[in-house]
Image (spheres, grey):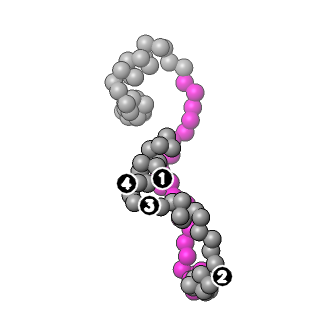
Amino acid sequence: MTENKFELARKLGSDLARVDAHVIQPHEYDELPEITDDMLARASVNRGGRPKSATPRRLISLRLPEDVISKWRATGPGWQTRMAERLMEIPK
């Protein structure tokens, strides 16, 4: 795995060893801007991830016969979603 990282670094032309060896000098701090209250007021926190669903799923435990599960799994990836959609079609 590390060999792939080194190959990728060579292709990108990066010199990570030189970057890691760099020690920040006091005069380099002068290049950084001072953080103002206005900057902090405009800041936002990005938590990332997927957006909250309007209809979130809930985990339950359901015992089904093995042959039923095998038939659904045989339909390929996404079988759980397809099963849920079929269950939604059941009339009230």
Residue 67 screen position, x and y as percent: 43, 13
Residue at (58% x, 62% y) in the render: 20
Q: Give the image quarter of residue 59.
A: top right
Distance from label 2 to label 1 (Cα)? 41 Å
| Above or below, comparing residue 25 to residue 61 in the picture | below
Residue 70 visible here? yes
Location of mark 4 (residue): 11
- x, y percent for residue 86: 37, 30
Query: Does dot 1 land on a helix, a strand or a loop?
Result: loop
Is residue 43 located in the magenta-colored stretch of the structure?
yes
**Is the Cβ of the residue at disc 2 closer than 8 Å to that at disc 1?**
no
What segment is highlighted magenta in the picture? Answer: 38-62
Q: Is residue 45 left or right of residue 76?
A: right
Q: Earlier in the sequence, mark 4 or mark 1?
A: 4
Q: Nearer the viewer, residue 21 or 73?
A: 21
Quadrant (top left/top right/bottom left/bottom right) for the C terminus: top left
Element type where label 2 sits in the image: helix
**Distance CA(mark 3)–CA(mark 2):** 25 Å
